[in-house]
Image (cartoon, rainbow, N blue to C red):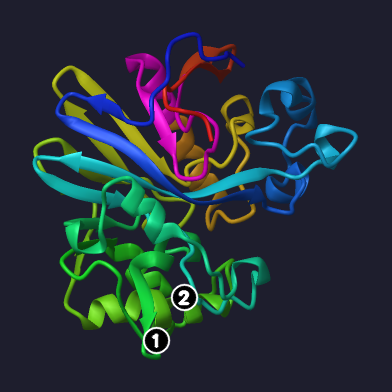
Amino acid sequence: MPTITRPTAPVLNFGGVTVTRAVESIASIGMTPDQFFPGTDASVWEEDAGSLRPHFLESDGATAMESTSRVAMQTWILRSGGRTILVDAAIGNDKDRPDVPSWSHLQTDFLARLAAAGVAPEDVDVVVNTHLHADHVGWNTRLVDGAWVPTFPNAQYLLPAEDLEFWDPANGHATIMGPGAHTVWADSIAPVLAAGQVVAWSGSHRIDDALTLEAAPGHTPGASIVRLVSGDDEVLFVGDTLHSPAQVRDAGTSSCFDEDHTQANATRDRIFSEAADKGLLLFPAHFGGHGGFKVERSGGSFAVVEWAPLDAI
């Protein structure tokens, strides 16, 4: 995989939109590649192990397939048209996550990291949840005097209608995430609904002149991406379309958290194809390192061709 050969910066500019990130945590997910990505091609991981470490693969195993995957929990901060837009909301503090003990009752300084990026909770105009998994909605709310209240009191929360229907416990859907999803709904979704701050959308949704939400199902029924088009620049924030650069070459392999593997694979192929044809930067939700990348076609698959000039984390 390529290395950065040009200067990096903590903030990127795309036309009239600035992009940076606030990181909640970066750590091993505790799963080897074959656990995280069932059916993955082991040869891809072994061949790319040198470039996957240290940002995407730990050095806790003798081989790549014996090592665990490394992921970032973070929020993309977009400033567009005089407004502040947050893309995804990480895990959050004080949340009870019995199915993922390492996410339970966290006490991180995430809000201080937002502040370091110049963002106070009251400054946020829009919060985008690309989908409604626990690690994308946690900071929707915070615990105040024993009650869950919206963290961003002046924000409009944009939530995909398909995920709202799918994850609502009242609808009784069976999901990969199991009954723990009911806790996520109670502490991170229901309070912003009750506050009247949610806008449910389907298909596509225009945020402003530069930013559009688009459906990208598979990981969840309502999974989405954010398209940024400003001036001569176009980039995509692709949520959980992928979780590791290894999936660029091994594009037909889904993560174990994808609800519909066939649909997720088709979405990934569609996005990679467009990105390769147009030279687009892609910013996944969970990439550490330089955060984003460009792809090119390589044989019957794709390859990372360039990393974003964002400071590595």
- Range of the magenta residues? 271-294
Measured in 3D between alpha carbons, the distance from the residue under mark 2 to the one under mark 1, in whole angstroms, is: 14 Å
Q: Percent position (x, y) of residue 189?
A: 35, 75
Disc 2 marks a residue whose amino acid type is Val
For the residue pair 161 and 82, the one nearer the viewer reads as 82
Q: Percent position (x, y) of residue 265?
A: 52, 40
Above or below, 148 relative to 176: below
Q: Is residue 81 magenta?
A: no
Give the residue at mark 2. Answer: 184
Give the residue at mark 1. Answer: 170
User: Element under label 2?
Assistant: helix
Is the N terminus in the top left, top right, bottom left or bottom right quadrant?
top right
Residue beneath the point at 51% across and 75% down: 181
> Is residue 131 in view?
no
Query: Which labelled disc corresponds to residue 188?
Result: none
> Is residue 261 in view?
yes
For the residue pair 89 and 255, the one nearer the viewer reads as 89
Residue beneath the point at 63% across and 78% down: 98
Furthest toward the bottom, the residue is 146
